[in-house]
C-alpha cells in the first residue's frame, strides 16, 4: 500500500497511533506494535489496550486491514474468468480443461442435482412406524404404556 493511501486513512491519528495501527495491520501483537510505535516497554501493554479501545484507532485499523486484504480475496467473477481461460487454452491438458469447465458450470448453476425420495417401484414412502410401549406405573397411579407380551405360540397379548 502506498504511503499516500496509508496517510489518508490515518490523518486524524497521532504519529505514534498511526505507527501502532501499521504494526498491528502487519500482524504484530498489540503490545509489540505499541512498543515499536515509541511507547515505553513498561507501559506498552497498557497503552496497547487503550489504543485498541480508541474509536479512531479502531476505524483506521479496520480500513487499513481491509485495504491490505482486498487484493488477496478472489471474487466469484475472478474465479469464473480464470476457469474460462483454462477451459479455452488448448495448451492445457484435456483433464484440466474439463475440470475447469465443470467448476465453471457448477458455479453458474448448470448442474442441478435432484434427489427423489420414493418407496419401492416409485410408490410413496410408507408412514413412519411408531412403536408404543406399555410400562408399569410402579405404584404411582399414572397409566404408562408397556410393550405387548409374546406368547409361546408367537401371538401377542397386552398385559
Image (cartoon, rainbow, N blue to C red):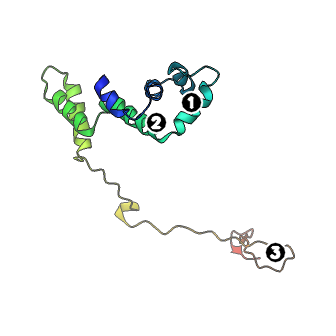
In the rendered image, the vertical position of residue 158 relative to residue 26, given as above or below? below
Quarter-wise, where is residue 79 in the image?
top left
Question: In which quadrant of the rendered image does the N terminus lie?
Answer: top left
Q: Could you say where residue 131 lies in the image, as x and y percent from the top left?
A: 63, 68
Where does the C terminus fall, quadrant-wise? bottom right
Query: Residue sitting at 42 percent across and 39 percent down?
Result: 59
Q: Distance from label 2 to label 3 (Cα)?
A: 68 Å
Give the spatial CA distance, label 1 vs label 3. Answer: 66 Å
Q: Earlier in the sequence, mark 1 or mark 3?
A: 1
Badge 2 is on which residue? Answer: 57
Which is nearer the eye, 36 or 149? 36
Depth order, front residue of 159/45: 45
Q: Secondary structure at mark 2?
A: helix
Q: Position of residue 2 (x, y in %)?
A: 29, 23
Q: Across the whole image, how many numbered discs are drawn on residues?
A: 3
- Mark 3: give few (<14), some (14-19) or many (20+) Cα within 10 Å: few
Question: Horizontal placement of 118 versus 78: left or right?
Answer: right
> Disc 2 or 3, which lies upstream in sequence?
2
Quickly name the residue at label 1.
48
Where residue 137 is drawn, which disc sits there? Answer: 3
Residues at discs 2 and 1 in contact (Cβ within 8 Å): no
Amino acid at each position: 500500500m502506498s504511503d499516500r493511501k496509508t496517510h489518508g486513512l490515518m490523518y486524524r491519528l497521532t504519529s505514534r497511533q498511526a505507527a501502532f495501527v501499521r504494526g498491528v495491520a502487519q500482524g504484530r501483537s498489540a503490545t509489540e506494535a505499541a512498543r515499536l510505535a515509541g511507547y515505553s516497554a513498561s507501559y506498552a501493554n497498557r497503552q496497547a489496550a487503550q489504543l485498541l479501545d480508541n474509536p479512531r484507532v479502531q476505524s483506521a485499523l479496520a480500513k487499513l486491514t481491509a485495504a491490505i486484504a482486498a487484493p488477496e480475496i478472489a471474487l466469484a467473477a475472478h474465479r469464473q474468468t480464470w476457469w474460462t481461460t483454462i477451459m479455452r487454452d488448448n495448451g492445457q491438458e484435456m483433464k484440466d480443461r474439463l475440470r475447469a469447465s465443470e467448476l465453471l458450470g457448477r458455479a453458474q448453476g448448470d448442474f442441478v442435482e435432484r434427489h427423489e425420495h420414493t418407496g419401492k417401484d416409485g410408490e410413496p414412502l410408507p408412514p413412519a412406524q411408531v412403536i408404543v410401549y406399555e410400562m408399569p406405573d410402579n405404584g404411582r397411579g399414572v397409566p404408562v404404556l408397556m410393550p405387548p407380551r409374546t406368547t409361546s405360540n408367537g401371538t401377542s397379548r397386552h398385559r
